Image (cartoon, rainbow, N blue to C red):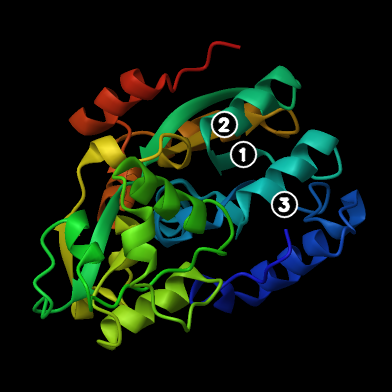
Amino acid sequence: MNKEPCAPAAQNPERRRFLKTLAAGAVVAGALPARAETPAKTLQVWSCGGLAEAMRPAHDAYTAAHGVEIAYTGAFAGALGKSLLSGSGHTEVFAGRVLALAQNLRKAGKMLYFKPLCFTSYVIAVPRGNPAGIAALEDLARPGVRVAMSPLASPPGGQAVMGILKAADLVKPVMKNVIDDQTTCVQRTVEEVTSGKAAAMIVERRITRMPLYAPHLDLVEIPEKFFPAGPLTFTVGVMRDARDRATADAYVDWIAGPEGQAHFERAGFIPAISAKGQELVEKLGVKDVA
């Protein structure tokens, strides 16, 4: 990983320090949150940073109901997964993006099991009122339409958007409309749309639910057939390093159950237990078969 996390999620100082440690290549057991120092009623949970908007309120609710403190780190899933696979990183529960990561952790014996957690989806975000009259992906290719994009954002940010355009056969005409002042952060680039500087941007629905952006955006749906499969899936699993298996199991059952899933729906995800979520579980094969 060679990029700093972007705002507003990066405003968490603990997460910034954690990511800088990973980026510097100093991923050693002593540099990561230590299991041995956590109280008996604390559960250590790592997740992809994209889940943070749902995880934080979910954890507050879980602690209030069950008296278990959650020591939470939300960061770049690729870096977290690499540290877990190498054995230099340790956590008790891991919620990662991309099914292959959970499968690899299972095959390596680092994760005991996983469950489907939620799915993401993509929309076209436009300024409130949709002044450019954007109604479909094809409209992003109209001459004069200013499109915001962050193609160099950490995966899957830029890659997923390019995948959508490629599937729709719109890469060249849309890229001609992309404004010059691109950033390497998806969330910062959304500000080009909320300010009206850009007419549209392809982005994950979850980002449009963030309080900073939601009041200033309207959404245009994108047909699911254009979504790249890889980035859609989030799973949650109990790690081999779980100190108290019963505590870890209870948390995973809760976060993947109705009470926990409600937080992901509010944050703009598709809960795995919803009808649509179950359809995606089958379609994408999100099952623990290791």
Q: Position of residue 104 (x, y in %)?
A: 67, 25
Question: Residues at badges 2 and 3 in contact (C-beta under 8 Å)?
Answer: no
Q: Is residue 274 visible?
A: no
Disc 2 crowd rating (10 Å Cα; few below 14, some 14-19, many 20+) is many
Q: Residue at x 43, y 29 (%)?
A: 116
Q: Which one is earlier in the sequence, the residue at label 2 or at label 3?
A: 3
> Dot 1 lies on which element?
strand
Which of pointers 3 and 1 indicates the residue nearer the eye? Answer: 1
Residue at image mark 1: 93
The amino acid on which the numbered mark 3 sits, given as a three-letter code, is Pro
Residue 3 image-quadrant placement? bottom right
Q: Which one is earlier in the sequence, the residue at label 2 or at label 1?
A: 1
Disc 1 crowd rating (10 Å Cα; few below 14, some 14-19, many 20+) is many
Above or below residue 82? Residue 276 is: above
Residue at image mark 3: 39
Compute the Cα span from label 3 to label 1. 16 Å
